[in-house]
Amino acid sequence: MSSDKILVVHADGVTTLTLNRPEVLNAFDGEMMHGLQHLLREAGKDPAVRAVVITGSGRAFCAGQDLGLGGDPNAKFELKADFLRKGYNVLVAQIRELKKPVIAAVNGVAAGAGANLAFACDLVLAADTASFVQAFVKIGLIPDCGGTFLLPRLVGMQRAAGLAMLGDKLDAETAKQWGLVWDVVPSTVLAEKAHALAARMAKQPTKAIALMKQAFNASVTNDVRAQLEMEAVLQEQAGETDDFHEGVQAFLQKRPPVFRGR
Ligand code: LHQ
C-alpha cells in the first residue's frame, strides 16, 4: 500500500514516516490512519528496520483527528467507540508493542490525538518551536489516543488534569521540564538530530530494546514482585541473544560492540 499522505524514507536502519497533509496540519483522515498502521506493521516485520521516526511535514507535527468532514461546516460527526477501537487504539498498541524503538520528531504543533501519538513513542525529540495541546476539551471530548493513560503517568495527576481540562498550549521547553519530552533542539536541525538519534538506536541491541519495552509496558500495572519476576524471565531471553554474547566479548576484548539485532 502506498499513499502520498505518509512519506517513507529508509536509511541507516531507520524508517522515517512523515505525516504529509500539511494543509490541515497533518490531521488524520481514514487513509492516513490506515496507512500509518500498515507502515508500522511493515516496519515490525522488516529485520533491516531497527528504529522508526514519526514526524510531520510543514509547520505542524499533527493536529489529531481531521474535523473537516469533507468541507461541510454543518456536518455532524457521528462518533462511535469503534472509531477509536479500529483507529487510534490500534496505533498506540502498535507503537507500544513494536519490537523496535520509535522516536517522535515533533516539528511543530501537536494537538489532540497528535500530541498523544507523540507521547506514546519511546522518545520524543521536539523542535524549540513545537508545542503540545490537549485540544479535546475545546470540542467537548476527553483525551484519547492513550492520553488518559499516559498523561497521569508521565506528568502526575495535577498536570494531567490541567492540560486536559484547560486545553492550553504547552511549549517544548516546559514539556521537557515536565518529562514529556526527551530533548529540545533548534527547529533547523530537528530532522538531522532525530535521524542521528534513531540511527544510534538502530545500532543498539534491538532484541534487548524490545524486551525493555515489554517490561516498561508491564511495569505500569505490575507490583514489584511481579516486575522482578518479569525481569528474570526477560533477562534470560536477552541472555540468549547473539548481541549479549557480542556485548560481553567486546567488553573483554576492550573494543566497541557491533550489535546486529539478533
Ligand atoms: C484542521 C485541523 C483538524 C481539520 C487544523 N482538522 N483541519 C478522536 C475521535 C473522533 C473524533 C474526534 O477526534 C478524535 C481525536 C482527536 O484528535 S480530537 C482533537 C482534534 N484536533 C483538534 O481539535 C485540533 C484542531 N486544531 C487546532 O486547534 C489548531 O488548528 C491548532 C492549535 C492545532 C493550530 O492552530 P493554528 O496554528 O492557529 O492553525 P490553524 O487553526 O489556522 O490551522 C491551519 C489550517 O489547518 C486551517 O485550515 P485553513 O484552510 O483555514 O488554513 C485549519 O482548519 C486546519 N486544521 N487542525 N484537526
Image (cartoon, rainbow, N blue to C red):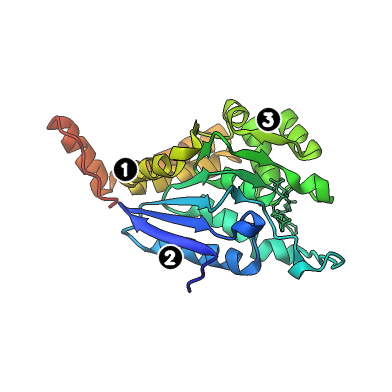
**Mark 3: which secondary structure?**
loop
Is any part of residue 237 visible from this angle?
no
Distance of label 3 from label 1 (alpha carbons): 31 Å
Residue 141 in the image: above or below residue 245: below
The number of numbered discs placed on residues in the rendered structure image is: 3
- Using the numbered discs, state the Cα–Cα distance from disc 3 to disc 2 in whole angstroms: 34 Å
Give 219 or 168, whichever is nearer the viewer: 168
Task: Residue type at mark 1: give it.
Answer: Gln
Query: In the rendered structure, which amino acid carries the disc numbered 2?
Result: Glu
Q: Which residue is mark 3?
A: 156
The mark nearer the N terminus, 3 or 2, is 2
Residue linked to disc 2: 42
Residue 229, percent from left and from top? 46, 39
Indicate left or right for 241 with 86 as reference: left
Task: Tell whether 233 sits left or right of 255.
Answer: right
Give yes or no for contact between labels 3 and 1 (Cβ–Cβ under 8 Å): no
